[in-house]
Image (cartoon, rainbow, N blue to C red):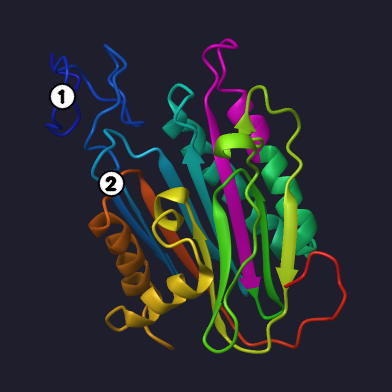
């Protein structure tokens, strides 16, 4: 009896049954078409994740949701040198998003909620390891926006950018990398207890918080270049549609070569109060 559900195609390698995580039950191979292109929206937020032109598997993952007045986004990038890194990225995004929503609704401060969600995601990814040599890993960036402003937390080289409708666009994160751009921070076995850095801002003008993987920022490394590209997207300029904007950013990376998986997630940021001068970790 064929174990495939709904007549779904079998494994690209052996013809066996493909599991819900996109791997073959029989030979374990990740399926190239699984999650090759993902688009997601929630409230005024939208994201696009694409496998790119050179990778067999999309090891990026994202999660986006709303919780009351809050918009929540998480973007993760599987570390290519680790096994089944796409599982790590998906699990981290799901766990962090799932932890942030109830925490924010209960009144937990965004900084505390982000730190706790990152640690939960780190423990979940570490639990995937079956041995020191079989330990999936991923990078991580999460953001929340609401009437009070924006907050982000990160580990690794997935980034967050503040892209205002007017004024200076800036990078909010600093990569956890060392010599030759080698990662010095990640989620997963061998990384220790996650110690995310958190940054916040209370901008006086509206804009968007961009969360993305290196598949995007290696082609558009500057905040102003990202905003210019976003403003040039059809129907996604100032006050325009976020999904068109995310598609435009990802499309630029693909047209420029698409050597890696690429993910862009845009969260709306309403105008708030001017940033408080001298506050550590703030925009």
* Disc 1: which residue: 10
Residue 51 rendering spot, x and y as whole percentages: 30, 44
Q: Which residue is mark 2?
A: 52
Mark in front: 1 vs 2:
2
| x then y, percent, for residue 247 | 31, 66
In the image, which residues are magenta? Answer: 121-145
**Which part of the image, by quadrant, shows the C terminus?**
bottom right
The Cα atoms of the two marked residues, 1 and 2, are separated by 23 Å
Q: What residue sits 44% from the left and 45% below the top?
A: 61
Image quadrant in which the N terminus is located: top left
Quadrant position of residue 60: top left
Residue depicted at x 70% and y 64%? 105
User: Is residue 254 shown to the viewer in this render?
Assistant: yes
Which residue is drawn at the image coordinates 17% and 18% (left, top)? 13
SS type, badge 1: loop
Does residue 236 appear anywhere in the picture?
no
Check contact, mark 1 vs mark 2: CB within 8 A.
no
């Amino acid at each position: 009896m064929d174990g495939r559900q709904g007549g779904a195609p079998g494994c690209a390698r052996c013809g066996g049954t493909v599991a819900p995580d996109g791997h073959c039950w029989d030979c374990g191979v990740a399926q190239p078409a699984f999650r090759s292109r993902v688009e997601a929206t929630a409230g005024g937020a939208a994201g696009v994740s694409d496998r790119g032109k050179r990778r067999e598997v999309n090891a990026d993952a994202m999660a986006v949701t709303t919780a009351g007045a809050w918009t929540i986004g998480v973007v993760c990038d599987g570390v290519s040198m680790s096994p089944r890194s796409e599982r790590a990225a998906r699990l981290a995004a799901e766990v962090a998003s799932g932890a942030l929503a109830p925490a924010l609704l209960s009144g937990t401060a965004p900084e505390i909620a982000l730190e706790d969600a990152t640690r939960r995601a780190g423990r979940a990814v570490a639990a995937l390891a079956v041995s020191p040599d079989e330990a999936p890993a991923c990078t991580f960036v999460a953001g929340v926006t609401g009437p009070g402003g924006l907050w982000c937390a990160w580990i690794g080289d997935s980034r967050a950018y503040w892209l205002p409708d007017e004024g200076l666009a800036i990078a909010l994160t600093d990569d956890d990398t060392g010599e030759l751009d080698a990662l010095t921070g990640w989620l997963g076995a061998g990384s220790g207890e996650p110690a995310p850095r958190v940054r916040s801002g209370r901008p006086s003008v509206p804009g968007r918080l961009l969360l993305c993987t290196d598949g995007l920022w290696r082609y558009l490394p500057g905040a102003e270049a990202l905003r210019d590209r976003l403003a040039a997207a059809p129907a996604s300029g100032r006050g325009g549609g976020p999904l068109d904007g995310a598609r435009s950013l990802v499309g630029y990376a693909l047209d420029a070569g698409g050597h890696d998986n690429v993910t862009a997630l845009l969260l709306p940021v309403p105008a708030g109060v001017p940033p408080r001068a001298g506050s550590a970790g703030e925009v």
